[in-house]
Image: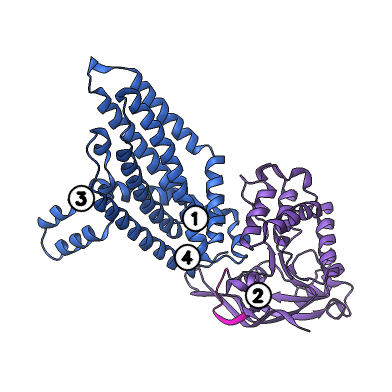
Chain colours: A purple, B blue
Amino acid sequence: MTAILRTEKLRVEYRSRELHQRTKVALCGLDLEVGAGEVFGFLGPNGAGKTTTMNVLLGFVPPTSGAAYLFGIDVRQPIARQRIGYLPELTYYYKFLTAEELLRFYAKIFGLTRAETNRRIPELLKLVELEHAAKRPIKSYSKGMQQRVGLAQALINNPDLLVLDEPTSGLDPLGRMKVREIIQRLKNEGKTVFFSSHELGEVESVCDRVAIIHQGELKAVGRVADITGKHANLEQAFLAIIGYQLQPVS
Amino acid sequence: MKNILAVAGVVIKELYRRKDFYVLFIVTILICVVMASINIYDDAHIVRYLKEISLLLIWLSSLVIAVTTPARQIPVERENRTLLPLLAKPLTRVQLIFGKFLGCWLVCGLALLCFYVFFGALSASREHHWPLLNYFQAAMLHWFMLGIIVAFTLLGSLVFAAPSSNSTICFVIIGGILFVGRHLDQVAMTLQAPVRTAVYCLYFAIPHLELFDVRDLVIHNWPTIPWAYFCLALLYAAFYMVVFLIAACLVFRRKAIN
């Protein structure tokens, strides 16, 4: 299996805002490997280090120590991002642009030709069901529509690796189903998807493998069935792995 | 270069889709037109006062554009998180800074073009001649001075997170340079060492924006500036733009974005 995404003993420390604490460890020796064509779920409670890991992978945050590679290239080099698509959590795109203009702008950054851009944009707008709103400014879009524009921009370069940070966050059931369908479709096309989510049912249904991170440390990694093991479902397994004791309801 | 141009294009689109510029332009036009329509004291040379006030308004409006446009670029991108999908693409931080700078500087250039065309038309309606070379020199020097301000404000936007605080600080510093900068050497002579050395260093370190203020050239229809001096002034401005942009790139290079 070729590793598309790899981290080696990744450690990230932040300067703490609390007086008595000089640094705060966000990630502690994270070793992760995602193979080509995998749909990989990255799970963890809030503040576990999921977004920090993604931030390092995308070059937003420099690691304190360790290294991260995309397609075998150090993430600090911009060329490592040529074949990836990224959808951040809760992003508001340029309000004064239309969806079509936004996609055209990102296509330019990827160096897509005019002909390729003209072919990709209607395809993507159709995929995310925004053809009817292509010429409207993004400021007039609903939250779900903005999330779908985000998904379209993440796919503009036909990426081999898609990094999605809580892609279904804030979406209605229909929107979530649509995102799931798109992930499934990408999986069928042989693309690699690395995504974080709190929707464990959704992770269970689309992921090949999952990793569970807690307090910056990798607690478990493996196939969904292996992680679930003797537990009733992934949610139960997740709670057990992070050490949460279920209290009986009185 | 295509990445820089793509980023600059978005900045320009933002200007013409927002209402700030139109408001400034319309207010400037209204004030100038009202002034031009009245003939105070029946003075034949009143046109000079009209030109002086019009140019002052143009200077103020262009300063507002040159400070407020770059001041909000990166902080707003961070606040709206649009910086994340942008930097997740094969776009370097240096390209982003240069793209933002180019966009803001071109925005200032477009605004100046509108202002100076209007000013030329207004003056010509009273004086019945167009000293085009004077206008060209004044506008070019003005534009290059705005380039220094844009680069400086962009650097400030990486240090001060809030656009409002950055704008205020930049306005104060630019005002200080314009009004006090040229007198710093005289102030230094009255001081004792080592304060004198410090003030002298400051005098030589700051960009002397007042050098680019050639409004009198247009107001009094003086002969054009020798072209060698004109080119030297543009080079002087280009040097400061590069210095501020390099500083901005260095500040932004290792900044964590989250």
In the picture, the quarter occupied by the N terminus of chain A is: bottom right
| Image position, residue A38 (x, y; %) | 80, 75
Q: Callout 2: helix, strand or loop? A: loop
Is residue A237 at least partly visible in the picture? yes
Q: CA distance from mark 1 to mark 4?
A: 13 Å
Q: Residues within 10 Å of mark 3 (few under 14, many from 20)?
A: some
Q: Which mark is residue B100?
A: 1
Amino acid type at circle 3 is: Arg
Q: Nearer the viewer, mark 1 or mark 4?
A: 1
Q: Would you say the residues marked 4 and 3 are in contact, meaning their CB atoms lie under 8 Å apart? A: no
Q: Quadrant of residue A34?
A: bottom right
| Image position, residue A185 (x, y; %) | 85, 64
Q: CA distance from mark 4 to mark 2?
A: 29 Å
Q: Would you say the residues marked 3 and 2 are in contact, meaning their CB atoms lie under 8 Å apart? A: no
Residue nearer the viewer, A27 or A87: A87
Q: Is residue A65 highlighted in magenta? A: yes
Is residue A57 at least partly visible in the picture? no
Q: Residues within 10 Å of mark 1 (few under 14, many from 20)?
A: many
Q: Callout 3: helix, strand or loop? A: helix
Q: Which mark is residue B27?
A: none
Q: Residue at x 77, y 48 (%)?
A: A130
Q: Callout 4: helix, strand or loop? A: helix
Q: Earlier in the sequence, mark 4 or mark 3?
A: 3
